[in-house]
Amino acid sequence: MPIFKKEQSFASGGLILFVEVPDAMKAELVLKGGGYAVRLVAPPPELRKGCDLAVEINLVEKLGIERLLNERDATYVGIAPLKIGTSELLQIVKVTDFGDWMMVRAGNMKLTFDRESGIIVNTSGGGCPDIPRLHAELIGKPLAQAPRPRDIGFTLCALMLDRALEECLILWNGGNQ
Amino acid sequence: MLIAGTVPIKGLPLITGETRGEDGLLVVDGYHLPCAQGTGAMIGAALATTSYLNLEPPQTVVAGDLGRGEGSRLIYDYLARHLPELSPEVLALHYILPDITLMRKVCQSVNRCPRKPIMIADAASMYVAKAAGLAAQFDIFTPDATEMAFLADPDATHPAYINQHLFDTDITQTPRLVTTACQQRNTARLLLVKGAVDYVVRDGNILATITQPDVPELEAIGGTGDTITGLISAFAYAGLELHEAAIIAARANRTAGKFAQATPATRVSQIINQFRAVFKEHLCQWSGVCYGEGEDYNG
């Protein structure tokens, strides 16, 4: 049962580059909180290390974006015009019904929770070094009280797991309204 | 057999040495490691296999890493400097933060080994091998269906970036994805594609499919992909042909899930605990190698 999510469209043209994935995740939060339309993407191939993340912005908003990032101590390498070759993050999620449990898959990551209690019973998939830690941190916790992978993880796998958790929360809240 | 990977223990230095089991934990160089999702599950499955076959236990290179990459860089550096002298028969890489430059150095080090090890990569190590254009240097990849789509996508450097139409396929599309990925030289020589149907693929040709026992709950259990990689590493180390190692690893993992009466809430350690019973009941029939438990597998 795939669930399609529509992205907000915006004029782009610029790319914020980072050394580390968590910096990109923080910048996205800061900018979205500041009302900017941004999205996470892969940097161009020549700038990739293998587990990279950049933030696509509307280049005309560069000045305000820089100011906001600096005010919030968000670390970034620089802002460049968008080049051909960036890739969008996967937006689609899939849900598997195991009867007493529901599993949500986002990209290579899966999160499973107990439908009655809302407790996370397993996470699987992925292979970046923060995934085993997130597995240990999330299992046994209610969905709404579990730490967010995007807050304590560092990699694209963690970001995908966060998407899965987000979808689980929607399913859980929908099922309990 | 050398298994290299990170574990989620803050501050754990780089440790190396033989692995042994103790009260459900793994012990390397005096450090106790959990047999949980990740490198621990992979080593645990490999150790269960070598123990049963009375083979030398896995040698391991492990470092603590919570995701920032410190432990991963220690492992890359250690392998780049020491692989020629270690010259393992099997080298399995797992849970190491992708870094194209450092993976290239490791592969250069492999090329200096007196004999090339059987090279196995799963998860992040597979991602970076493909992203770096080094996939053809590997003997075995163990992707799941999503990761197979990633290997088939010429532009993706991580499964988070695969093209949506590739993600929106199910395991039955695996043959098409395999063909695409092989044409682009984005795969290892042998693939074990894990899913509702497990596909064993060599040089782009599907050699076998495994569907039984059918335990769909395994997909939800964190670490059951890691155990497959540990099993296939150990069976390759035992001298089985690589495709035989893959087939038996897939069967053993499924059967262990059945023996454990797995649910989506089962932990991977419960699966690992079943391997001895699985081997005792089925390994002789599956492998054609039959001997009494505790006897020397090498005769």
Image (cartoon, rainbow, N blue to C red):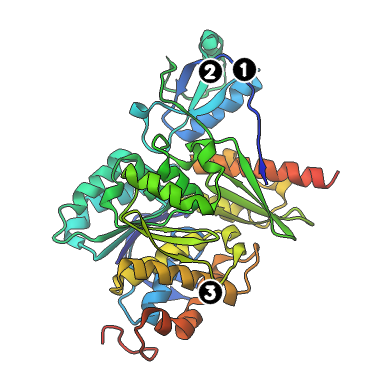
Q: Are marks 3 and 2 on the same chain?
A: no
Query: Residue at label 2?
Result: A57
Task: Please tell me whether residue B174 is drawn above or below residue B270 in the rendered image.
Answer: above
Residue A109 left/right relative to B97: right
List the residue tagged with mark 1.
A36
Q: Do labels 1 and 3 share a chain?
A: no
- Residue kind at label 2, given as amino acid type: Ile
Contact? badges 1 and 2 (CB < 8 Å)? yes
Label 2, residues with CA under 10 Å away: few <14, some 14-19, many ≥20: many
Chain letter of disc 2? A
Identify the subunit bearing mark 3.
B
> Callout 3 environment at 10 Å: few (<14), some (14 to 19), or many (20+)?
many
The quadrant holding residue A164 is top right
- State the CA–CA distance, disc 1 to disc 3: 51 Å
Residue B287, numbered circle: none
What is the tally of numbered marks visible in this picture?
3
Q: In the orientation shown, which residue stands out farthest toward the bottom?
A: B292
* Residue receiving disc 3: B255
Within the image, what quadrant is residue A113 found in? bottom right
Amino acid at the residue labelled 1? Tyr
